[in-house]
Image: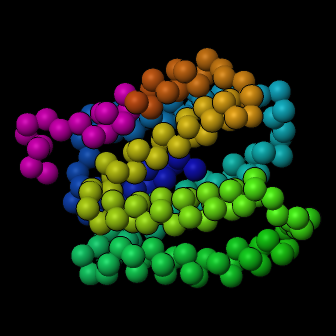
Amino acid sequence: MYLSPFIVALGAHFFLKEKLNIIKIAGLILAFLGIIFVFRGKPTSYSQLMLYGDLLTIVGAIFWGATTLYIKKFLAGKVHPINTFLYQLVFSMPIILICALVLEDTWVKNVNIYIAASLFYQSVIVAFLSYFIWFKLIYIYPVARLSSFTFLAPLFGVFFGAVFRKEEITYGLISGLVLVCIGIYCANYKHENSAKT
């Protein structure tokens, strides 16, 4: 999934005049290597079937990157971020519902406080607030620099998995965190000659 920043960086270089330089390219590569380190130490529950999921996320990364570029090039400055956000959210609802009807084995019948809190978190915090903020940031900042921060998402996922689910923390997570942080710094680094670009 974290091929998406590369799609965005290359597309922004060619279509949005957000020029790449050696430091930014090195930063993206370092951050991507960090993600490889995180997932290199596979847990004991790893299954070969996960490869199919990985292939699907590569396709998703390409579309995610293309969507980000499209929004920045054709919608930023012309359409309010809330409209861009709502269009995607509203049109995805029936698709997600159909997928749930087809793929879900069992449905929740008894709602308790944990289910209600989970639903609130997924619908209000994740699907509404975080995506709205993301679209707002796309309108304001260069997308190549902004997308490099998405490399932090799997690190937080693995970290919170360890905290809340007692999953193992590997040396790959620690080294990956260091590489991702250095990579994000490099991808957003501005020297004096490029401060105006």
Q: Nearer the viewer, residue 197 or 111?
A: 111
- Relative to 151, say whether 53 is above or below: below
Q: Position of residue 170 (x, y in %)?
A: 66, 20
Q: Residue at x 39, y 39 (%)?
A: 28
- Relative to 169, say whether 87 is above or below: below
Q: Nearer the viewer, residue 51 or 119?
A: 119
83 horizontally vs 102: left or right: left
19 horizontally vs 126: left or right: left
Q: Nearer the viewer, residue 129 or 20?
A: 129
Residue 35 forms part of the magenta stretch? no
- Relative to 125, say whether 98 is above or below: below
Q: Position of residue 42 (x, y in %)?
A: 73, 28
Q: How many marks?
A: 0
Q: Residue at x 43, y 66 (%)?
A: 132
Q: Residue at x 58, y 50 (%)?
A: 1
When asked about the image quadrant of residue 188, the answer is top left
Q: Position of residue 15 (x, y in %)?
A: 29, 65
Q: Residue at x 53, y 43 (%)?
A: 153
Which span is picked out in magenta? 182-197
Colour setup of the view: rainbow
Residue 158 appears in the figure: no
When asked about the image quadrant of residue 48, the answer is top right
Residue 197 appears in the figure: yes
Residue 193 forms part of the magenta stretch? yes
24 horizontally vs 58: left or right: left
Q: Position of residue 118 (x, y in %)?
A: 69, 56
Q: Which residue lies most toward the top here?
A: 171
